[in-house]
Image (cartoon, helix red, strand yellow):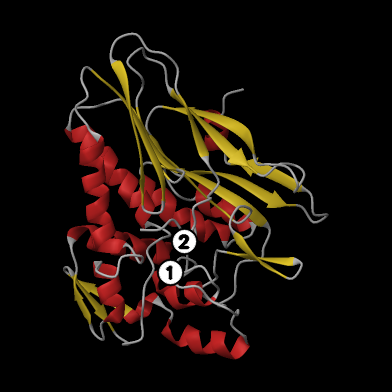
Amino acid sequence: MAVVHKSALLFLPLLVMLFAKQKDQQQYSIQGYAQGTDYSIKYFANDSVVTKASVDSILLKIDSSMSLYKPYSQISRFNLSKKGMLIDDHFARVIRKSFEVHRETNGKFDVTVAPLVQAWGFGPKPVSNFPDAARIKELLQNVGMNHLELQGNYLKKKKPGITIDLNGIAQGYSVDVVADFLLKKGIRSFIVEIGGELRVEGPKPDGSVMKIGIEGPAASSTDEPEIRHILSFSTGAVTTSGNYRKYLQRGKGKIAHLINPKTGYPLDNQLISVTIFAKDAMTADGYDNAVMAMTMKEALAFVESKKGMEAYLIYHRKDGTVADTLTNGFKKMILK
């Protein structure tokens, strides 16, 4: 599975993990490459009960289900089907969550955006030209989650031309699957990170909480992104969606990789980056893209209406300068 709209993208706003020394259990680390990006796992235990091979096996199975970059995957076969097909439990769980996020955000999150993502050059196949207005109008005929229906584990197409892209939520789900695997192994202190999507369980064995660095754009567009805040919390997930790292150049302008499923065009609004805190990574991952499609005022009101969800927003002021704001709950997690 490639990293994405977040789309298909390797360079999301990064969440930097900071670990201190501990006293009782030993810290174990696993690094690897999967789903088009790097992953990192750090956990505390008395023995190395989780191995790289076991993690790679989990991620390979998820890729075989939902990777657009694997021609044999279930999602690739579903996209080629005319009426739909029976899907596995991984696929079904992500689709169920996708329906929830779609409903709660009034369609700002939509997995049927796949043809638009591809047309704008962020899908599995390279493109030579961006779509014109007529082409976008044509593609929008096959966009809309009302054209999908999940019956048990059978995902039905109501229109044969519907194709889906789960890259805006499946990586968060992958983080949760790996995190749940660690919990089943009896590990109660860890950080699982895939492509910047991150879930924490803690505290550390010495009683201290985990510390997470949140990256954002520098004050000057010519400078490298910088760590803007350090979060401190014991349990939960943090994911980020942004348009300052992944884009395509068009003349002097930039084409953001986040596509508005209602208009068919890349997002071009006030928000630069959205970091969401939630109880699990799939929830945070699913909602961060949708919140990016809102105004700053709408985004703050939306997140504050969701129990257990917090947000950190980076945005453009009217004069073009960069500013940021946080929900009250997010502010409480920031280390001074």
* Mark 1 neighbour density, 10 Å: few (under 14) some (14–19) many (20 or more): some
The image position of residue 208, as x and y in percent, is 41, 16
Taking the spot 41% from the left edge, 40% from the top edge, the residue there is 198
Label 2: few (<14), some (14–19) or many (≥20) C-alpha neighbours in 10 Å? many
The residue at the point 23 percent across, 47 percent down is 58
Residue 8, numbered circle: 2
> Distance between the Cα atoms at labels 2 and 1?
8 Å
Question: Can the viewer see residue 193?
Answer: no
Q: Amino acid at mark 1?
A: Pro
Spot occupied by residue 115 in the image (x, y as percentages of width and height): 45, 78
The quarter of the displayed image where residue 156 is located: bottom left
155 and 80: which is toward the camera: 80
Residue at 60 percent of width and 70 percent of height: 266
Secondary structure, mark 1, is loop
Q: Which mark is residue 61?
A: none
Q: What kind of residue is marked 2? A: Ala
Q: Is residue 214 above or below residue 119?
A: above
Look at 50% across and 89% down and name the residue there: 138
2 and 1 marks in contact (CB < 8 Å): yes
Q: Locate the N terminus and report the quarter of the image it occupies.
A: bottom left
User: Which residue in the structure is indicated by mark 1?
Assistant: 124
Q: Is residue 111 left or right of residue 55?
A: right
Place of residue 227 in the rendered image (x, y in percent of width and height, measured from the top left)? 62, 34
Any part of residue 5 in sight = yes
Numbered disc 2: secondary structure: loop
